Image (cartoon, helix red, strand yellow):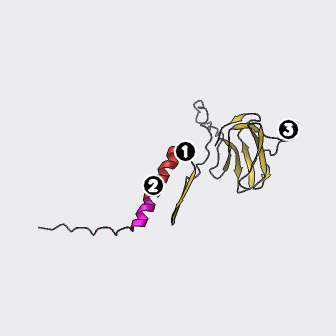
Amino acid sequence: MARARRADPPAATPPGDERTVELTRRLATLLGELGLSELEVEAADVRVRVQRAAAPVLAPPPAPLPAATPDERPLVADVVSPALITVEAPMVGTFYRASSPTADPYVQEGDAVKEGQVLCIIEAMKLMNEIESKVGGQLARVLVENGQAVEYGQPLFLIDPQS
């Protein structure tokens, strides 16, 4: 009769590492519950930073197309590259593409933009807040209409950093 061999117990994790792992798990849970993109905690000799990976911005699904005959190919509408960087509204307010109604917009689709360049203004509580690009590249798309109300975290622009 064959005897079952008992597996060796896993190596014990040092107590400090177990606490760090547990803290990281709790922070990740909080990140999801609160809808945050980043959370950092520092206590004594431990510093933990949990950051959610940026989800690629996907275009809304296209309207259903009529059934295609074998000779026709369906058209692909509004495909967004996952390599595009999204510039989001950092606050609730009103989106403006220019500094005044008669001024030219700060940027147009296809323009080259630099990191730190002003892309638009969001008016919040009678204050005009300049929104800057967080990367350099080419402005692929403006996602908001001039004068439209925007929410915190709402995508405003798509920038192609590889251009």
The answer, for residue 43, to whether it is visible in the render is yes
> In this figure, which residue is indicated by the disc labeled 1?
35
> In this figure, which residue is indicated by the disc labeled 3?
100
* Residue at 61%, 43% in the rendered image: 58
Q: Which residues are the magenta region?
A: 9-21
Q: Quadrant of residue 94?
A: top right
> Which residue is situated farthest in the left direction here?
1
Circle nearer the N terminus (3, 1): 1
Tell me the distance, in whole angstroms, between the alpha carbons under discs 2 and 1: 15 Å
- Tag on residue 25? 2
Question: What amino acid does circle 1 point to?
Answer: Gly
Tell me the distance, in whole angstroms, between the alpha carbons under discs 3 and 2: 47 Å
Question: What amino acid does circle 3 point to?
Answer: Ser
Question: What amino acid does circle 2 point to?
Answer: Arg
SS label for mark 3: loop
Circle nearer the N terminus (3, 2): 2
> Which residue is situated farthest in the top direction here?
66
Q: Quadrant of residue 142?
A: top right
Q: Are marks 3 and 2 in contact (CB under 8 Å)?
A: no
5 or 47: nearer the viewer: 47
Q: Is residue 3 magenta?
A: no
